[in-house]
Amino acid sequence: MLSSERIVQALEHEGVTHVVGVPDNGSRALFERLWAHPHIEVILTSREGEAFGLASGLYLGGATPLVLIQNTGFFEAGDAFRGTAYNMGLPLVMLVGYRGYKTMEPGAPRVDTAATFFEPTLNAWQIPYTAMHEDGDIEQIPAAFSKARETSLPTAVLIVPETV
């Protein structure tokens, strides 16, 4: 199980100043913990594409933003992501909930195709990513910040399971 408390501690350690995104059922506990945080400002957007524009602007203004969305929202944000964070070469880190992950298990009913398209899309767009399954994987957050700085490109950490 992933702990929202441990995730927020990792974000604090990386100096995250803002979390920009759209809450969903899977990220609810994480957003609730962030809303209560005294130093990390949460900015909600109505669409995920807005999150990348806002986070890009915050980064250019000297902040350390993080984008927090679900994989279906990443699909919605494609052009905004490409046109801002990716084309501008910004080292943004995104935490992305992995909706539908369990439907890919052998024998599971395939009622949601979001998971089926998610990693192939990240690979096609050459976005480095890792997946957190439990608290022992939290070190992937600082590794993603390092990778983003090293490549000057956005990097993703996938949140599996969706609920933290």
Image (cartoon, rainbow, N blue to C red):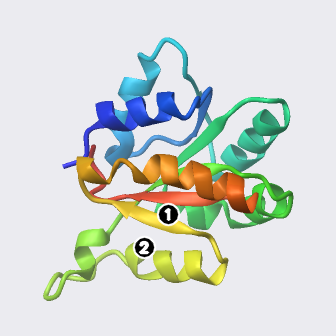
Residue type (three-letter) at the residue carrying disc 2: Ala
Determine the residue positioned at 67% across, 44% down: 51
Residue 98, x across and y down, in percent: 38, 62
- Mark carried by residue 72: 1
Residue 25, x across and y down, in percent: 33, 45
Whichever of labels 1 and 2 marks the residue nearer the N terminus, that label is 1
Name the foreground residue: 98 vs 13.
13
Identify the image quadrant of residue 63: top right
Residue 37 position (above or below residue 101): above
Q: Which residue is mark 2?
A: 114
Q: Is residue 25 left or right of residue 144?
A: left
Determine the residue positioned at 37% across, 43% down: 27
Name the foreground residue: 163 vs 62.
62
Residue 29 position (above or below residue 85): above
Quick check: can you spot residue 106?
yes
Residue type (three-letter) at the residue carrying disc 1: Thr
